[in-house]
Image (cartoon, grey):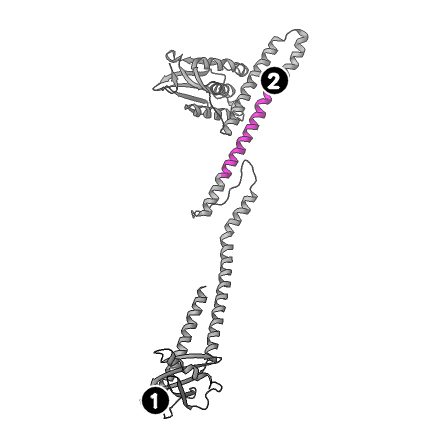
Amino acid sequence: MLNLLLYTTLSKSLEIAFQSNILLEANGVLVQLRDDYLQIPVTNADQPIQIWLGSSGSATKFYERTDFPDGYDDLLPLVIDQFYTQENKNRFTIESDSLTFGFVRNPSETAPDSDIIVVLSKNNREHKEQLSALKNRIILSTTSACLISLALSLLFAQISLKPINLLIEKAKSIKPSTNMDRLPESKTGDELSQLSQTFNQMIDRIEEGIQNQSRFFNSASHELRTPLANMQAELELELDNLKKKKAESTLRSIQQEVTRMQLIVSDFLMLAQLEAESISTSKETLRIDDLIYDMIDKTKYMRDNSGATLKLKIDHRIESFKFLGDKAKMESLFSNLLINAYKFGDNSESISMNLHSGEGSLTLSIVNNISRKNQQMKGNGLGLWLCKKISEIHGFHLSTKQSSDRFSVELTIPTNAHNSQH
């Protein structure tokens, strides 16, 4: 569009310049006839002319150069008549085929009421060729510019899309696992860098979900295998005891394993809800000492199996302290803390469990020596992780501390109006 406007402007300017030059040359001839229109003017070789004497309604040719184009004797008088039909018109041009004629007039000083009219003929073929060449050059330049722009656009697009294509190929090669690859991130801070960061954050979440799922199934297979194996062995023993009428101890042991499995299944269900962020709480008024005694009783089978002893100390001032909490989740919290101490504790000293009050809170602490033998057992850490999540849900704080031979955990419960009831 811009090139078309440029061509129109240039061609119009060249046309006006060509016509003005013809009229200027014709006017130069007319000036020579000012004193005597009958004299023969001096003209150049490329200036074939006619000289007319005209007045309103008539025009008479009285000179014509021999090389003036033929075939226009009938046309030119009609054209000359435009001087008188169009008021104040003293010069104009017309175009006929390959010729352009310039017409100029001036009142004659020697012929009253008459005008001297000069008609100058010019071949416009060269002028037309110049316009055609200009048009071709503009078309060529426009086409070249379009092709160059297209090539540069394709090159720029290829260069611009190369990092994106690399990201696509890298993303296609990433497989779901517990240790997934990451997309490369540049430090430019542009949109591509932000896209890589966003993808990597998504990969982080996927990887974390896979890791949690893997830990869940590993823990499930490990935790459920033990009570099931125990129940299998005890059932086989029960078959023998039935014959000997000594089934009571075996049935009691099976009951403990069932209790253990109930706790494990409850923890796994809670773990799945936490992973899906769909867990809900149903808080009620709980008495903390009752909760502690109940969990000590429910985990007795684990304490007996490990050979551990428990030393419990509760501050009498807070013995009947009540707080708002989800009973099932608090039972899971307390049972996991005790089971962790039984499983990895050293039986040379009793496990210490103290409940005491502080400023604006009460603290439950469990301290146990670490067994060198049990320390070599690979735990998955899900029990303590679950305890921390339950504490966060209730607005409590759980902290752990470990040295080379001692492990301690503290649960801090605020005693404000929202958590406590008296």
Callout 1 environment at 10 Å: few (<14), some (14 to 19), or many (20+)?
Answer: some
As for residue 218 lying within the magenta part, the answer is yes
Q: Is residue 364 visible?
A: yes
In percent of the image, x 57 and y 23: which residue is there?
Answer: 223
SS assignment at label 1:
helix
Is there a contact, CB below 8 Å, between mark 2 and mark 1?
no
Q: Which residues are magenta?
A: 202-230
Question: Which amino acid does the dot numbered 1 rest on?
Answer: Gln
Q: Is residue 380 visible?
A: no
Q: Circle 1 sits on which residue?
A: 32
As for residue 367 lying within the magenta part, the answer is no
Question: Which amino acid does the dot numbered 2 rest on?
Answer: Asn
Estimate the spatial distance between the alpha carbons at disc 2 and disc 1, rounded to whole Å: 136 Å
SS assignment at label 2:
helix
30 or 291: nearer the eye?
Answer: 30
Tally the marks. Answer: 2
Indicate left or right for 90 with 284 as reference.
left
Where residue 391 sits in the image (x, y, percent)? 44, 23
